[in-house]
Image (cartoon, grey):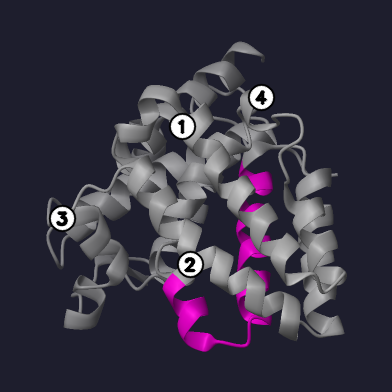
Amino acid sequence: MPVAPSSPSGRVAPPSQRGLLTERIARQLEHDIRSGDIAVGAKLPSERELAVQFGASRNVVREVLRRLEAQHLIEVAPGRGSFVSEQTSGQARSYDVLYRAGRPTVRHLIEARIPLEIEIVGLATERAGEADLTVMRAANHALESATDVVRRAQADLVFHDAIAQASGNPVLRIMLSSISGMMFEMMLRSNSDPSIAEPGVPHHPEILQAIEARDVDLARARMREHLTLGMRTYGADLDVSVDAMARQHLETLLRQSDGHR
């Protein structure tokens, strides 16, 4: 049985904390690279130095570096280290970068998701095939059985993407995908906030049931109720930028995780 990696202090970090640390470090480095705080061609600190800097294990740092490499933000040269890649105009002006430049708030994101995902779920209810439904069911099961907030948020995102795929409209799916980074940050908060489980509010199982029943009006109504819940539960965070909300919430979750050890 594999042993969980330890932090630089020698303590073993539980899986839930590893996931949160990975998210926090990846967000910070991605921000620093995209903003130019870390220049193109610059060599990142070594794995050991990054581990000490962020108070994480080297396994967590490796996972972060793999993610940055997959995003084409860095190039890893064996034996030499990791270097910041030159960004193409398309990468530099990706939709996520443009959105965040406007400092969108949680309210802005919810307002954008409501018309987009209501239309998506209506089309998916009409068009979903059995393969689409299988993906939705698997994502719903993964969400319900996940034991930590990062895995729940990942499954949450997969569920909404599966509905977009089932809509049969690639433009709508790409539109939803373009805000998936900010959605994931909201989902970290939603999947760790007890108030989100407000009684009587439709969540994934109820939305899935409506899609399976081919009831377009019900599916659209349930998606609307699901998305507008945040307007009642986010409180002052509604008008905080998504970036700031995510950063503050990640720090809160990490403190809670560390306090339970």
Look at mark 4 in the image and give the residue it sits on.
Answer: 194
* Residue at position x 73%, y 82% in the image: 126
* Residue 66 in view in this figure: no
Look at mark 1 in the image and give the residue it sits on.
Answer: 250
The answer to the question of whether label 3 and label 1 lie on touching residues, with beta carbons closer than 8 A, is: no
* Residue at position x 25%, y 54% in the image: 100
| Residues at marks 3 and 2, CA–CA distance in whole angstroms | 29 Å
Let me know if residue 152 is in the magenta part.
yes
Side of 152 relative to 92 (left or right): right
Secondary structure mostly seen in the magenta stretch? helix
Mark 1, secondary structure of its residue: helix
Choose between 39 and 102: the one closer to the eye. 102
Choose between 18 and 210: the one closer to the eye. 210
First reached walking from the N terminus: tag 3 or tag 2: 3
Mark 3, secondary structure of its residue: helix
Hey, which quadrant is residue 142 in on the image?
A: bottom right
| Residues at marks 2 and 1, CA–CA distance in whole angstroms | 27 Å
Q: Quadrant of the N terminus?
A: top right
Other residues around mark 4 within 10 Å, as few (<14) / some (14–19) / many (≥20): few
Kind of residue at badge 3: Ser
